[in-house]
Image (cartoon, rainbow, N blue to C red):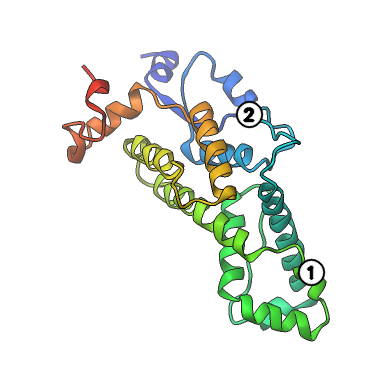
Amino acid sequence: MTLRDMTQRCYFVTDQGSNVKSALTNFHRFPCAYHTIATVLRHTLQLDSLSRILPMDRNCPVMKFVDAIRTVFAMKSLVGYLKRSGLNNKLSTTIEQASKTRWNSTLVMLQSFVSTEKEVKSIIKIHEQEKRLTDIDVCVVADLIHFLKPFQDATKALEGELNPTIHQVYLWWSVLKTSMNVEPTDNQLITFIKSRGSYVLLQKFEMNIWHKLALFFNPKFKALVAFIVKKNLK
């Protein structure tokens, strides 16, 4: 068996970088679910200024979205100040700094702020830095955590290093799709973000026959109970 024959039997799992996709044009390639989730969130929350997926309408009446972005950046600035000043070490639980390359670090930052909110406000007041809290809307923080939590759960489930997780991709795609169904109790911010997220998910996180076959070969789902009847594989 030649090397080319061997590679034709292999499937590469990569990010969606144009250089990688170009290099593997003649081979079988799957987009990494972990990276795909990051892409969905980057476009949904408009974290990428180059986003071409459902760009933000400057005349959009949902100004809460702007408040959400402002809150995230204000939070990053606050954590940066706490770290530089050494005040972060005085908290019972330090607040994690968000990384530009890992969306889930933003969620961890928001969660750690909520768990130490009273301490942070007390320390900030003692040092007369209350202005650093001006653009942080705690209601928006709660909304973002609520929206991002299913993505965090999906990421943890799909980033297996020792075991394959392709049989779980369709299931978690379905969970994320369902989590973005707008509910009557959703406020303006959540309604708007869910609408954007639902659109981007379908554009960027595509399911194919291999994801469904992998699910089928999982003994727990061999009856394809996860699929709508009309979409059952023949």
| The C terminus, quarter of image | top left
Q: Secondary structure at mark 2?
A: loop
Three-letter code for the amino acid on which mark 2 is drawn:
Ile
Q: Position of residue 147 (x, y in %)?
A: 51, 51
Image location of residue 43, percent across then percent down: 63, 37
Give the crowd class for mark 1: few <14, some 14-19, many >=20 residues within 10 Å.
some
Residue at mark 1 to residue at mark 2: CA–CA distance: 32 Å
Q: Residue at x 58, y 42 (%)?
A: 192
Question: How far across and how far down the image is residue 72, in percent?
Answer: 69, 56
Mark before the other along the chain sequence, 1 or 2: 2
Q: Which residue is mark 2?
A: 53
Asked if residue 120 is positioned above or below residue 79 in the image, the reply reads below
Near-viewer residue (87 or 146): 146
**Displayed quadrant of residue 136:** bottom right
The residue pinned by badge 1 equals 132
Mark 1 secondary-structure assignment: helix
Residue at 60% x, 18% y: name it: 22
Q: Amino acid at mark 1?
A: Arg
Location of the N terminus (image quadrant): top left
